[in-house]
Amino acid sequence: MFNEIKNFPAQVADAINDTKDLSLDLGKIHRIVIMGMGGSAIAGSIMKDISPHLEIIVERNYFPNAIIDEHTLLIISSYSGNTEEALSYYRHASSFTKNIFGITSGGELLESLKKDNHDFHILPQGYPPRSILGYTLAVLIKLLDEDELLELLNIELLQEYSNKFSLESSEVFALAKKTHSTFPVIITEEDLSSIGYRLKCQLNENSKMLSYNVTLPEMNHNDIIGWENKLIDKSFFSLIWIDITWPQNVKRMNITNEILKHKTSSNHHIQIPSKLKNDLSGLFYLLNYLDWFSYWCGHLNNVDIDAVESIDILKKKLA
């Protein structure tokens, strides 16, 4: 996992190069449904956050809950191509629309897409599904005609940051030392909720840690009351704030930290550097930073970062 995270910017650059000729006719498309599970779904959630002008629905299920018709573009994303939920969803949804595009590295999904004469993009093989996010996200951005977002990415600067974060002398490692033995509560603003969820998932899988993510200002209308429980052990929880920028939410963050200072072991605000603020480079910076954070937490927890033992057991029992 170390090399996959370190080479994240290069992976994005490869995806941009590999998708130069990728295009779809979106003229008659009124709705976009992106279906995937786990690491294959998160790119869809991020795409929904960064392109609010598109009607994007992300589904994680065996069958459609969203309305799918002849004006719907259905994107099925399954890295292995054998995810049972994705295959089931494809079988149910393919009778509702002919506008289907697949993102996969192979498997039964690729065979079905070929047989049914649907378009697809083949992902490079050999990655844990959760580590191919940069590539999958770049494919979606290109596919949904948002090319200018990719053109502005500062790949060279992103690689410089990734190289720095790969060192134990980095600020990311220092943050992991403070939080790897805690239950992190991740807080973002509403328009970055997918990034908070991504970190929650990476802490689950890479670090073998429980965590949850919430958003501001909603957190201050319910979650904050739960902290009044007198049985909470201060050493158990930490707060991770991700790029809080709206002035009133910055006030909320500072007041919340003050209220919870006797309930949490630490709080930290991860911010996008000013030189990356003006385009999508900032979002890719956060993705890489948070992946390193989960990696170093796993390293400090002395776990096998690549392993997903419980998922493997579950799949065997379901088969």
Image (cartoon, rainbow, N blue to C red):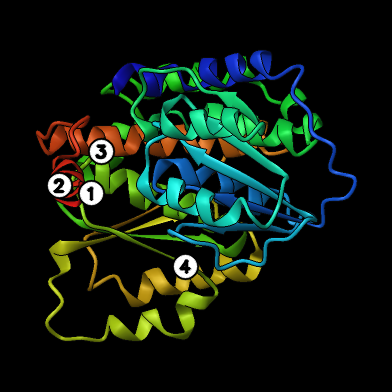
Viewer-nearest of discs 2 and 3 = 2
Q: Quadrant of residue 217?
A: bottom right
**Helix, strand or loop at disc 4?**
helix
**Residue wearing tag 1:** 179
Work out which residue is located at the far right of the displayed protein and give it.
27
Counting residues from the start of the chain, the first of labels 2 and 1 encountered is 1
Q: Quadrant of residue 131?
A: top left
**Helix, strand or loop at disc 3?**
loop
Amino acid type of the residue that numbered disc 3 sits on in the rendered structure: Asn
Amino acid type of the residue that numbered disc 2 sits on in the rendered structure: Ser
Give the answer, above or below, for where 245 lies relative to 6. below
**Disc 4 to disc 3, C-alpha distance:** 29 Å
**Residue wearing tag 4:** 254
Count of numbered circles on the image: 4
Give the answer, above or below, for where 147 lies relative to 283. above
**Disc 2 to disc 3, C-alpha distance:** 13 Å
Assign the N terminus to one quadrant of the image: top left
Viewer-nearest of discs 1 and 3 = 3
Residue 18: percent from left, percent from top: 65, 14
Q: Is residue 134 left or right of residue 22?
A: left
**Disc 4 to disc 2, C-alpha distance:** 38 Å
